[in-house]
Image: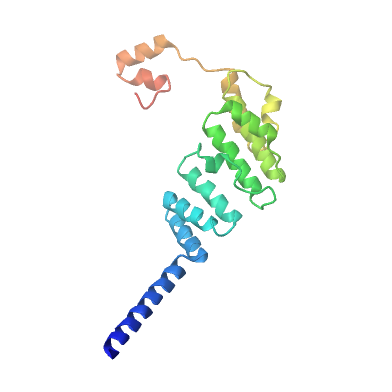
């Protein structure tokens, strides 16, 4: 009887110990630490799962931003976690989240949604406002219509303007390659015509 009682007591103690360790492992702080570890290891999908598990018990804007950054790192730009509004407007990371949303729409070639988001987003930081204006100009440079040079160059810094101006002028005055020259070069040296036409990889 005494042996049986000791066995039950030991079993009860072990169960309590396992439960305590499980509770400790599943504590919000440890979930967050594990998620951060996965994030640093670039295991973004599992990091997102752990971050979301953490957010069920704790509110944290840094964690919300890391979910966005994880999707962004995986180039999953159309995920609701990127395009929604997971970061509060009063958060320190509000501007970061909004800018990543604009970049995602830009990368998705969602011109209508991108322009709508640019016009409706109210940045509280002038640096991010300027970055969004630059992004808008890049978007306009890829369109068929050509805007004025001064409008395109306006938000860029002096050291950035020469490169943007060069891109603008190449769009305004495209360098057409002669098909006759390309054919002659290809006849002389196979592949050289494609290199001449700018298709270096094919050449």
The x and y percentages for residue 153 are 67, 30
Horizontally, is 67 left or right of 164 in the view?
left
Give the residue at x 71% y 26%. 150
Residue ranking furthest to the bottom: 2
Give the residue at x 49% y 15%. 176
The x and y percentages for residue 24 are 46, 70
Q: Nearer the viewer, residue 75 or 27?
A: 27
Q: Quadrant of residue 114?
A: top right
The x and y percentages for residue 129 are 69, 40
Q: Is residue 118 visible?
A: yes
Q: Is residue 137 visible?
A: no
Residue ranking furthest to the front: 1
State whether residue 143 is above or below residue 43. above
Q: Nearer the viewer, residue 184 or 194?
A: 194
Number of disc labels = 0
Where the N terminus falls, by quadrant? bottom left
Horizontally, is 156 left or right of 175 in the view?
right
Give the residue at x 69% y 32%. 119
Colouring of the image: rainbow
Where the C terminus falls, by quadrant? top left
State whether residue 58 is above or below residue 131. below
Q: Quadrant of residue 191?
A: top left
State whether residue 7 is above or below residue 189. below
Q: Nearer the viewer, residue 104 or 180?
A: 104
The x and y percentages for residue 25 are 44, 67
Q: Nearer the viewer, residue 36 or 175?
A: 36
């Amino acid at each position: 009887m005494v042996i049986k009682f000791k066995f039950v007591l030991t079993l009860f103690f072990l169960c309590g110990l396992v439960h305590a360790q499980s509770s400790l492992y599943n504590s919000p702080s440890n979930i967050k630490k594990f998620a951060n570890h996965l994030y640093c290891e670039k295991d973004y999908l599992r990091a997102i799962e752990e971050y979301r598990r953490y957010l069920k018990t704790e509110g944290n804007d840094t964690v919300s931003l890391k979910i966005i950054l994880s999707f962004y790192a995986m180039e999953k730009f159309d995920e609701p976690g990127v395009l929604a509004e997971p970061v509060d407007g009063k958060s320190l990371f509000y501007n970061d989240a909004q800018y990543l949303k604009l970049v995602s729409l830009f990368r998705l070639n969602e011109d209508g949604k991108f322009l709508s988001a640019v016009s409706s987003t109210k940045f509280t930081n002038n640096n991010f406002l300027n970055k969004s204006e630059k992004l808008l100009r890049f978007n306009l440079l890829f369109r068929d219509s050509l805007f004025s040079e001064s409008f395109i160059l306006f938000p860029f810094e002096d050291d950035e303007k020469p490169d943007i101006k060069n891109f603008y002028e190449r769009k305004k005055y495209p360098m057409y390659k002669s098909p006759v020259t390309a054919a002659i070069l290809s006849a002389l040296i196979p592949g050289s015509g494609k290199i001449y036409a700018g298709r270096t990889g094919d050449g």
